[in-house]
Amino acid sequence: MDRCKIEVCLTPAVYETFRNDDAVVVIVDILRATSAICTAFMNGAKKIIPVATLEEAQDYKNRGYLVAAERDGIVRDFADFGNSPYNFTPNRVKGKEIVYSTTNGTNTIMMAAHSHEVLIGSYLNHKALVDHVHHKKHDLLILCAGWKNKFNLEDTLFAGALAESVLRDDRFYTICDSTYASIDLWNIARQDMNAYVEKVAQRHRLKKNGLDDVLEYCHTFNLTTKIPFLKDVYLVTE
Amino acid sequence: MDRCKIEVCLTPAVYETFRNDDAVVVIVDILRATSAICTAFMNGAKKIIPVATLEEAQDYKNRGYLVAAERDGIVRDFADFGNSPYNFTPNRVKGKEIVYSTTNGTNTIMMAAHSHEVLIGSYLNHKALVDHVHHKKHDLLILCAGWKNKFNLEDTLFAGALAESVLRDDRFYTICDSTYASIDLWNIARQDMNAYVEKVAQRHRLKKNGLDDVLEYCHTFNLTTKIPFLKDVYLVTE
């Protein structure tokens, strides 16, 4: 039996040391990009165009696209709405193509473009991801977006939650220190998620801007079975 | 009261995002560089010259220096002995200047050279480090050497052990996700260190080469009060 390995890359800064073109790569940016993207597709979005810079976002807006863009929690003048998952309501997004501008998330998505598959992961589609990965039988690389190239806790916890679930199928294995660390941290945090997330730096950043209302939502399991994936430079679910 | 912050940089690859020229920086490479360096000074070494490449090490050897150098666990022909802490016995090192060639450790030591202080940390001098950091009242940056720019568990655990001890003095604080993670992992591992270290990737690398006899030694607290520090391009203790 060929076994598939699981690795966790804790920050995009070290992605090259984990690069594995044969792997299914799951991008994780729990607060808030990948949670928002999963929400958008859950609510019927047709396509998401992730862009790294506000200039690109504005350019798309000028060409008539629906644009989600903010920096430091402030919705940009030209944008239709901000980056909170709560903005991606069915009446706004159903059947639409949406441009999504995010600091950490977009570059992370695109750097893995050469992989077997690039999937968008969050608690919202956790079970669907586990089922998909079991079915695919490829190596799994969980790539955390982090915060400006730093490690962050919230992405690491989800990496642990995902790795642990996938490892229940013994066709998968790990010998990766960051995978072990993620699983151990997840098993501490899961005992009282709200309390644990108190100490996450990004929580304080969001709170400062009144944006921490999404915390509980972004840590909710299995609201959708949709798995956004990268197709060319777009995210779609089919 | 001015409070001092503690941060943990989990891999040299993201050092620039943590760079803090006013900080006391503690370099951590538990298996085995910083444990070996602490051992050398404990046993009377006068000076250590850390070098990154084997070419540099050989050049020093040709000039008559005592040289510790190996790669992948094999002592190099030209070297006097290898990189295990057990090689740095009093009869070999007392009063000597020693060249020490290490893959991950040396670059990590030198990249922090602009900081207030660069100290060599290991379990062997844990208490001395804590006392020193409390006395200095500067920010503390714990810089893990990792493994070829990847996160590793053994350095992270020590970072947690050190951060937790320093934080007992409430003039120190942290808001750093990797510090929280390190402390949480340390508190899992400390319950049964030998069992936890079983899963560390570096343990398997060392075992493969018959070099894992140092594991218990490298996790022994407080064998020495000496704190090697960087002075120009050398490590000394006074």
Image (spheres, coloured by chain):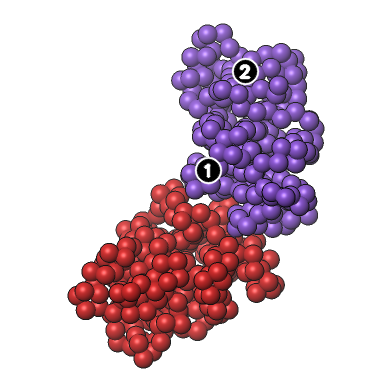
Chain colours: A purple, B red
Disc 1: CA contacts within 10 A as few (<14), some (14-19) or many (>=20):
some
Chain ID at mark 1: A
List x then y, in percent, for residue A36: 67, 29
Which quadrant of the structure image shows residue B196? bottom right
List x then y, in percent, for residue A219: 74, 41
List x then y, in percent, for residue A33: 62, 32
Q: Which mark is residue A19?
A: 1
Circle 2: residue type:
Ile
* Residue A205 at least partly seen: no
Q: Nearer the viewer, residue A26 or B57?
A: B57
Secondary structure found at label 1: loop
Q: Residue at x 51, y 54 (%)?
A: B150
Location of mark 2 (residue): A98
Which dot, 2 or 1, sits closer to the camera? 1
Which quadrant of the structure image shows residue B111? bottom left
Which quadrant of the structure image shows residue B102? bottom left
Q: Residue furthest front?
A: A1
Q: CA distance from mark 2 to mark 1?
A: 29 Å
Circle 1: residue type:
Arg
Quadrant showing the C terminus of chain B = bottom left
Q: Residue at x 75, y 21 (%)?
A: A43
Q: Residue at x 56, y 71 (%)?
A: B207
Mark earlier in primary sequence (2, 1): 1
* Residue B101 at least partly seen: yes
